[in-house]
Amino acid sequence: MRERFIRDGIAEYLKRLKPYARLEIREAPEEKIPEHVTPGEEKKILGREAEGILRLLPGQAYVIALDRAGEMLSSEELAEKLAALALGGKNEVALVIGGTLGLAPAILQRADLRLSFSRLTFPHQLMRLILLEQLYRAYKIMRGEQYHR
């Protein structure tokens, strides 16, 4: 993370989430992307990134891949989804954010849910902060605790 404000925001939401969930951030190495990359090179880069991501995924985890083309949920629906997973015995959930080029088809195929926060494109560093905020919001909703609207 280059930007301090993003690092600070992530640290704040990790702190807020401690009473609700055990979180672990795992990072796969991001491949260098040439300035003028061909579609074939993009495919190779995505493939190498996918290998790194797949190695980090716990074998039995329910995998949620963030994908602009995925399903859009409200904060309440995300809370319901996470609660249903917990009730169903899925105590390990892996949320996957892609790099600059997004996620390889192999990751999207491995995903149990493809989740979209928006059709807009966000920098992946900022997406981590947004995701943590939404997880915090979801846990507050699940517990019936007040959260600003």
Image (cartoon, rainbow, N blue to C red):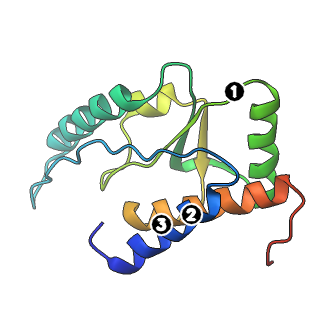
Residue farthest toward the front in the current orientation of the protein:
19
Say whether marks 2 and 3 touch (CB < 8 Å).
no
The amino acid at mark 2 is Lys
Residue 15: mark: 2
Say whether marks 3 and 1 touch (CB < 8 Å).
no
Drawn side of residue 51 relative to residue 35, left or right = right
Residue in view at x 15 percent, y 53 percent: 33
Residue 10: mark: 3
Residue at numbered disc 1: 90
The amino acid at mark 3 is Ile
Residue in view at x 18 percent, y 35 percent: 44
Q: Nearer the viewer, residue 25 or 127?
A: 25
Q: How far apart are the alpha carbons under marks 3 and 1?
A: 25 Å
Q: How far apart are the alpha carbons under marks 2 and 1?
A: 23 Å
Residue in view at x 82 percent, y 30 percent: 87
Tag 1 secondary structure: loop
Say whether marks 2 and 1 touch (CB < 8 Å).
no
The quadrant of the image that shows the C terminus is bottom right
The answer to which of marks 2 and 3 sits earlier in the sequence is 3
Tag 3 secondary structure: helix
Is residue 123 in view?
no
